[in-house]
Each structure stands twice: as structure tokens, then as C-alpha cells.
Image: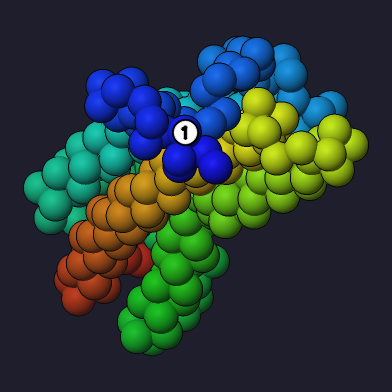
Amino acid sequence: MARLSILKMPISAAALALSTPAWAEGGIPANLSVGGMFMQADWLVKLVMIGLLIASLITWTVFIAKMMELRRASAKERETYTHIAAFRSLHEAAVDANLAFTPLVREALAELKASSDALHDPDGIKERIVSRFERHEALVGRTMTRGVNILATIGSTAPFVGLFGTVWGIMNAFIGIAEKQTTNLAVVAPGIAEALLATALGLVAAIPAVVIYNHFSRLIAAHRAIVADTAAAVLRLVSRDLSRGQASALAQSREG
């Protein structure tokens, strides 16, 4: 009957009737702006959205803080490597004011002091120094990754948290349909919109977290490579001193 009535209309009126959605006749009373959808959302969906916003804030806070920390640490480590590479013996590095408190130099001197009665075995000394350096590199890695792992957690869980909000919003939409016994879009649209907003916030929190985590993984690997280069440079100084027979005097001076 509706099609017959349309056929009886003038051509322009029939075209307008066919192009106008049926739900538009009653309009959508809900406020479908972002703020409006948040205010109209169920309390559980609101909690999901707030949690995702907090996760996004944490992501950017970690990004700024860790970026500054890594830049300072890498610049300092590169400067240390440049200084150490210019010396010919560990003694020169030990008395340099810029390197006196460098962890790798301290570790090498501590091992020479502990092995002052075993300097006849240079291979054993170098092996123990390498062991100290490996522990130091592991400590640097743990320090640099502190706070970064939370980005992996956010990146892996935020989409599922957003999906939970989506499912809950769709459930509310179907409950509204059942209560009002209508399929009018004015009843369905708010719940669907809230669900999609929760999904969008989940992606907004997850995507930057994953990208930033991968970026920090590369930066931390590069920083550890610089530490390894510095450790190799210190080990070369120790090897030279052992070959020259200067390690004994250095160990005794540090012991005294």
C-alpha cells in the first residue's frame, strides 16, 4: 500500500519520500556528540571509557618521561665511550675526572683489586671482568625498561576493554528495543553509538601504546649497544695493561 501511495504522488514528492529514511520522520532526540554520548552512557560503559582515557594519559606520560631519560642516558654513554676510546691504559681512564665514577671503569678496577694475587692468569681476569660487565649491562637494561612494559600491557588489553564496553552498549540497545517494543533507530542509536565510542577509545589507547613500546624497544636496544661498546673499550684497556705488566701496579695502587 505504501508503494501504491508513493506512485500516486507527484514525481518530485515521490522522490523525496523514497530518499528520506523512515526513522527520520520521528528524529533522534539523543545527543550524539562525544560528550553527550558519554553522559548518556550506562555507568559501566562510563567506567570503561574513563579507564581507557587514564590508560591513554599514562601512555603519553611514560613516553615523555622515558624519552627524556633515554636521551640523557644515551648522550652520557656516548660521551663516556668517546673518552675511554681515546686512552691507552686503564690507569689513564681511572685518573680522569670525567671517568672516575664510571660504573664500567669501577667494575674493572674492583676486579683487578680482587684478583691482585692472580694476575698471572690474564684470561681468568678478563673472563671475570666480562662477567661483571654482563651484569652491568643487564642492570642497565632493567633500568631502561622500567615503566615501558606497562605500554605493552595497555596495547594488548585496551582493545578488549573497549570491546567489553561495546558489548555492554549493544546489550543496552537490545534491552531498549525489548522494553519499548520498537525498532525505531531513535531507540537503538544511542546504545550503538556508546558502544562504538568505547571501541574507538580502546583503539585510541592501544595503538599509540604499541607504537611507542616498539619505538622504546629499539631505543633501549641501541642504548645497550652503546654500553656494550664502552665495556669492550674498557676491556681493551685492561688487556693492554695485562700485556704490558702494568695491571699489578694498578691493582696495588687501588688496593692501597
Residue at image location 53% in from the left, 31% down from the top: 22
Note whether 139 is above or below 6 in the view shown: below
Q: At which x and y percent is residue 163? A: 64, 50
Horizontal side of residue 48 vs 162, given as left or right: right
Q: Secondary structure at mark 1?
A: helix
Residue sitting nearer the eye, 3 or 167: 3
Q: Which residue is mark 1?
A: 5
Q: At which x and y percent is residue 177? A: 79, 40
Please identify the quarter of the rendering in which residue 80 is found: top left
Q: Is residue 200 visible?
A: no
Residue at image location 47% in from the left, 55% down from the top: 141
Please identify the quarter of the rendering in which residue 166 is found: top right
Note whether 32 is above or below 199 in the view shown: above
Residue sitting nearer the eye, 24 or 217: 24
Q: Is residue 171 visible?
A: yes
Horizontal side of residue 18 vs 145, given as left or right: left
Residue at image location 76% in from the left, 37% down from the top: 182
Q: At which x and y percent is residue 239? A: 24, 72
Residue at image location 44% in from the left, 50% down from the top: 210
